[in-house]
Amino acid sequence: MTSMGTKVPPIVSSNIKVKTAWLYYVEGLTQEQIADKLNVSRVKVMRTLAACTAEGVVITTINSGTAEQIALERRLERQFNLHSAIVIPTPNSAEHLETALGHAVAHYLGEQMQDGTTLAIGGGATLFASLRFIERRKLSNATVVGLVGSLAHSRWINPSIVAARVAEAFDIDSYQITAPVIVTDEKLRQALWQQPTLQDVRRRAAQADIALLTVGDISPQSTIFRHGIVPPELIDSLKAKGAVANVLCYFIDRQGQLVDHPINRQVMAIELDTIAQIPNVVIAAGGPSKVEAIRAALSVVPARVLITESETATALLG
């Protein structure tokens, strides 16, 4: 495992060059402070600022189409106590949203996955979309841990596929919850978690350096209901209990609390209070229907990084 529990990771962005200029020219940070935030040398900061001037990124103010995104990133970081926000432009078509967010997720993983890193990862359309963009390379002593159980019908919606494919991209081992995403009752869930192999997965997840999650809303269009992972017939009863979001197939209310519904006692996924203890929790989600769900997710797990798009970012700040 890496030392991320004791060392603050470098700040990241949709455009690190423009963010460097923003921190220096707009927020008035010193070059030393910026170097510390980015985990680079002061010389590197000086060269970046010089390049911004030479390339016309900075004139008197920041002259870049991404300046608005950086402003949103900084506002999100302050309002939600994030270490980093990554805001990408909202795609022209909603059908391209998952692909655009997946590209940003893949870029983030490419930067953060290093030798010795343990990544705990969920499933969902956004994380699956990232798989096509991950640059393949070989890591040493790194692992991927799946946070959600599996489906008998193995399509892209199967959460375990994401963990396995990410591990394959980095040529490392993966560990899976070898049980259904949803079991028939609470007693079976408790019995399964007593199995030594699943206890090992739970322990590895608790010791992860990074947890990468997405968020779903409570609607028929949400992946979890649209593909029958959870029966859509439960939507009304979940809403009646106050559910506004699902994270790792757990259903939570606006305050980030698990709702009192039987389905929450049938989920084979790592518990959210365990996720909250992982040093670097990353949430990747976007879209107008998910604004309330993202707010709820940020309440239940202390995310350090949020990956989203500009319209969702604006709505979150509103």
Image (spheres, rainbow, N blue to C red):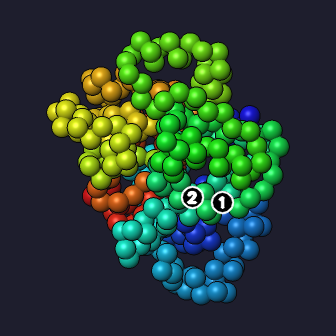
Secondary structure beneath label 2: helix
- Who's the residue at 42% across and 24% down the image? 183
**Mark 2 residue crowding within 10 angstroms, few (<14) / some (14–19) / many (20+):** many
Q: Which quadrant would residue 35 be assigned to in this image?
A: bottom right
Residue 207 or 103: which is nearer the viewer? 103
* Residue 12, horizontal then vertical, whole percent: 60, 58
* Residue 17, horizontal then vertical, whole percent: 62, 71
Identify the residue position indicated by label 1 in the image: 134
Identify the residue position indicated by label 2 in the image: 130
* Residue 205, horizontal then vertical, whole percent: 61, 30
Q: Which quadrant would residue 52 be assigned to in this image?
A: bottom right
Q: Which quadrant would residue 89 be assigned to in this image?
A: bottom left
Secondary structure beneath label 1: loop
Q: Which amino acid is tagged 1?
A: Ile
**Contact check, label 2 and label 1, Cβ < 8 Å:** yes
Q: Which amino acid is tagged 2?
A: Ser
Residue 16 visible in the displayed image: yes
Q: Which quadrant is home to the N terminus?
A: top right
